[in-house]
Amino acid sequence: MRTRNWSIRSKIITMVTVPLVALLALWIFATALTAGPALNLLAARTLANTVGNPGEVIIGELQRERRLTVQFLADPSASVGLLGQQRTATDRAISDFRTAAEGGDAWRDSSETLRHRIEQVFTEINTLPAQRRHVDRRELDPLGAQNLYNGMIQSGFDMFAATATFPDDEIDRRIRALSTVGRGQEYLSRVDSLLAAVTVTGQFTDELRMALVQDVGTARFLLAQGVEDMPEASRAQYQQIAAGDAFVQLNRMMDRLIVQSRSGQLSPVGADSWHPAYEKSGQQLRDFENDAIDTLADRASSLALTIILKLLLAALLGLIAFVVSVTVSVKVGRSMVGRLRRLRGEALEMATERLPNVVRRLQRGENVDVDVETPPLVYGKDEIGQLGHAFNDVQRTAVQSAVEEANVRRGLNEVFLNIARRSQTLLHRQLALLDRMERRETEPQELEDLYRVDHLATRMRRHAEDLVILAGAAPGRGWRNPVPVIDVVRGAISEVEDYKRIDIRSIESSAVLGRAVGDVIHLLAELLENATSYSPPHTRVQVSGQVLPNGYAIEIEDRGLGMTHDAIDEANRRLVEPPDFDPADSARLGLFVVAQLANRHGIRVSLRQSPYAGVTAIVLVPGELVVTGPGPAELPAGPDRPLVGSGSADPSRSSLAELQWQGTEQLRELTATGQPVTINGIVAHPEADLPRIPAQRESPEAVPGGPVPASVADGLSADGLVQRRRVRRPADLGETTKALPKPGAGRKRGIAPVTSAPPAQRRPAEAPPAQRRPAEAPPAQPKAEATEDGLPKRVRQANLAPQLRHPVEVEPDEPTVPLRSPEQIRSIMSALQLGTTRGRIEASKFVGDSSSEDRAKPEKEGNGGSPGGPSFADAATVSFPAIVNVAIANGEAAARRGNGAAGDRTENSEQDPVTRPEKDTK
């Protein structure tokens, strides 16, 4: 047993307790050894009253019933009335014995062997009613009935023998002798019953004579053996009984039965002379047994009281010695433990109060006096006092070390902050330089590389802000006005390496106060980075948000490796109570940053296991940081619609795709304003903090006969970065813009009509133009019938789209053109070829080098979209293919008409470059 880690108190208690417990155990053992036999001796009288005396009575009643039963079987008329009365007396004796034997005292004081013998007696007695029925039907002979009663009576004597288990040998020997005398008297009773049967029949049979002779011999042997083992007084009393007239006469008649009885002859002894002598001798023997039992009970009680008195005296002395030992041991141990407790208390006070207080004062920049903060501990000159002096040295060294450590930590934080500020300065300059380069660059491949570098710089800026947070300072990014939650989420996604795998689900309209936008973006970016890093590359990360009564909840769910319950509990504790930064625990740097940012603004962040085997992070932004009501940005209608640009795998259903193709009317409206166009397909105002999204139309208007827009993902590079293109000024269109067809002229070619004058400029928050009416709502459907299982029944053509419920109007065929001569056809074809060639040349001047990039192209690996869908850059510039198609159609029309004159149209406003989701607008 190792006691090195035990406390001093435990060691002292053990040192005192072990001897005391050993002494107590020895005392209990001796007491149990002595008290057990003493209690058994005290129980002797109880057993004599509850088992011995009732047992004697029941045996006597069974003996008398046996005699009358044997006599009844020999001659029914001899003892019919007497047998019934005797059976009643026997049943009454059995009931009294059962009550006494099953009582609480008798059963509790009985040994296991005695209880077993009592149960055997009950078992034999329970067969008595059945045996009586056999006797009444005379199904037994006298000797058979004799044997049945012999078994019942023998079980009673076995019960008496089981009581002879006392610890005193003298008492045990006397009880056994009394049991032997009782059994001898039982064999005399057997002789009496057999002789009664012979007297009724008038002669002996061989079986009866043999049984009678054996019973006489056994009775004499048992009586002599029992008396021999009894004390002198009991033997003298027995001799008096044996010398009496009744017993002498009984012995003489037994001698005559043995010598003169013959099979087939009359009995030499008459019933009139035998039965009175037997009754008197039997009563004398029973009185002798009862007197001996009472004498033994008195002796046992006296002996038990003597043993108990000695035991109590020894117990009292042992108890006094035990109490004295305990008192002395406790007094000495308590003194030592008390001094050690005081020493420990002052040491703990130094460790838990004074030293942390010193550290906090050092963190606040206060000066600390080591001598004042380390008062000496005085505890005498013994070993405990020497230990107190050692603690004095320890606490002085600890406080001095705390001062030095605080100075080191302060210097380390200043180093972190200095490095971070320098890195932030360089990164902001780098981002500004990249922005100017992206504005000037028109080559797709170069733009792709610039965007990749831009994205890396954005992530580096977040890591630089991590150093600022580690140093205990604020990152520095801030906004003046509230920013929509959707823009905050997009800003966080743009700072994640694998942002293509992130899907934005339903985000309810709300906004975050400008002072907390930067920290919320950083917090969400850390959680998103963790979700993408610890989940398989083929899985998606889902982001959703909703307005709550006490704030706004943003949920981030991944389907990655997950965490154990213990790890989640530990992480949640760290998020609730952010610990001090430990440089050795660099693996949890992101968790520390999230905890610090959440604690700064009262944001609650909790982790839990996801049903998809990953982890779900829930960010609850408090109500004081959330601006409720209709925000400046909304998501497209519909539940759980993923947004392209955030990594959605379904760009055809995104808000960007819906905003991308809205006809040349929207194109002219956007190009005429001269304002920058964002990737979300909206106009970004300079005074806005982040790009805003106009209110979503209830149903997008379909362009009749218009071309299908190209995939949004076609504008992405191989790693998912945006390929930006510049929007040409109207002045660059040259003569082509003047040659645009009138409204309705291009409907045969599937071109949306374009008006010559641009519409009035409007802000994103204003309502959409009147001509863009929402699609009609489908008619209300009647409630469908249900099957037996509760599923709806299908009704043919009940769920058709509204467009399919009416027949399609087919345009009439054009009138037949008269046949032309070959010369006319050749002239027309030549003119058509010349006009087409001229139109293509003019169109190339209009679109420049980007025209080939704006056409639909097959899907490339990593573009994040589907073949033929709208590209990301196309969404940002609002459909360059529409401009190309309009220019080509106009050129062909001009060639047929031979109208090549067109004036240049110029505008002084210059189109601003496209903003990126990862760029922060201050």
Image: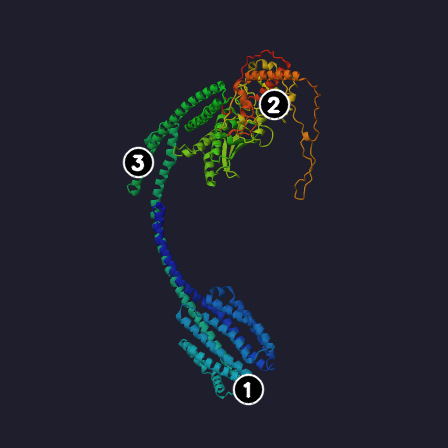
**Occupied quadrant, residue 581:** top left
> Which disc number belongs to residue 203?
1
The residue wearing badge 3 is: 393
Q: Secondary structure at mark 2?
A: loop
Whole-angstrom CA distance, mark 2 to mark 3, is 81 Å
- Horizontal relation, residue 560 to residue 664: left or right: left
Residue 574 shown left or right of residue 738 in the figure: left
**Is residue 478 visible in this depiction of the protein?**
no
- Work out whether residue 495 or residue 141 is closer to the camera in this orientation and state it: 495
**Exactly how many numbered labels are in the figure?**
3
Q: Nearer the viewer, residue 369 or 657?
A: 657
Residue 662 disc label: 2
x and y percentages locating residue 684 in the rendered image: 55, 20
Instruction: Give coordinates of residue 603: x percent, y percent.
Output: 50, 31
Which amino acid, mark 2? Gln
Give the amino acid type for the residue marked by disc 3 in the picture: Asp
Which one is nearer the viewer's eye here, 904 or 897? 897
Q: Amino acid at mark 1?
A: Gln
Quick check: 246 above or below 920? below
Q: Confirm or deny contact between disc 2 and disc 1 (CB under 8 A).
A: no
Is label 2 or label 3 in front?
A: 2
Q: CA distance from mark 1 to mark 3?
A: 118 Å
Residues under labels 2 and 1: Cα distance? Answer: 139 Å
